Image (cartoon, rainbow, N blue to C red):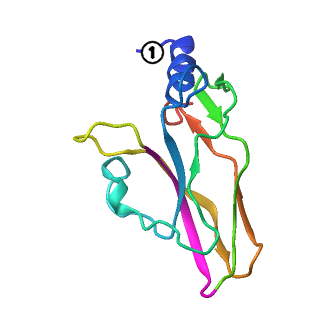
């Protein structure tokens, strides 16, 4: 079992607060993978392709903290994707994180979550803004 401080150390290490960047890419997806959430792999996502979209690499996350239920959590700064010249509207349904520094036999998908509200970009300059909160475990009251 991880201790309270152990949870914070793991999150800070995994998400690059201490030391070298682990090579994370935050991406948007236009689909929601089916099946068991634990069995989802990177290939199950359809990455956004709207003009102006680009993966966001290694944002400067804040130090991990504990919430009221002693779950370790870490927050990203606001991640912003801005649409360029839109030809066809595109709806983004979830956000996912891929590690670019995994071994060949391990899938790179680290984490994913459906957006609280799906976002459609249809006009140049429209933005998708997300703050990602990652917990060390599921909610246990």
* Residue at (63% x, 32% y) in the render: 74
Q: Position of residue 33 (x, y in %)?
A: 39, 63
What is the residue that sits farthest to the bottom in this orientation? Answer: 87
Quadrant assignment for the C terminus: top right
Q: Is residue 82 left or right of residue 32?
A: right
Q: Is residue 88 above or below residue 26?
A: below
Q: Which residues are magenta?
A: 87-99
Q: Is residue 42 left or right of residue 30?
A: left
Q: Is residue 33 left or right of residue 17?
A: left
Q: Position of residue 31 (x, y in %)?
A: 46, 69
What is the residue that sits farthest to the left in this orientation? Answer: 105
Tag 1 residue: 2
* Residue at (56% x, 14% y) in the render: 4
* Residue at (41% x, 63% y) in the render: 45
Secondary structure character of the magenta stretch overall: strand
Q: Is residue 34 left or right of residue 82?
A: left
Q: Nearer the viewer, residue 106 or 104?
A: 104
Asked if residue 69 is among those painted magenta in the image, a careful observer would answer no
Q: Position of residue 65 (x, y in %)?
A: 67, 23
Q: Is residue 47 above or below residue 103?
A: below
* Residue at (63% x, 45% y) in the render: 132
Q: Residues within 10 Å of mark 1 (few under 14, many from 20)?
A: few
Q: Nearer the viewer, residue 71 or 31?
A: 31
Q: Is residue 106 above or below residue 29?
A: above
What is the residue that sits farthest to the right in this orientation? Answer: 125
Quadrant assignment for the N terminus: top left
């Amino acid at each position: 079992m991880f201790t309270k401080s152990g949870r914070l150390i793991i999150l800070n290490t995994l998400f690059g607060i201490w030391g070298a960047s682990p090579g994370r890419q935050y991406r948007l997806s236009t689909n929601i993978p089916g099946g068991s959430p634990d069995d989802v792999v990177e290939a199950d996502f359809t990455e956004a392709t709207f003009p102006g979209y680009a993966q966001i690499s290694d944002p400067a996350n804040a130090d991990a903290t504990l919430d009221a239920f002693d779950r370790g959590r870490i927050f990203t700064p606001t991640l912003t994707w801005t649409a360029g010249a839109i030809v066809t509207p595109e709806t983004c349904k979830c956000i996912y994180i891929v590690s670019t520094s995994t071994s060949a036999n391990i899938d790179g998908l680290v984490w994913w979550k459906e957006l609280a509200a799906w976002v459609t970009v249809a006009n140049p300059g429209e933005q998708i803004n997300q703050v990602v909160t990652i917990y060390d475990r599921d909610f246990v009251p």
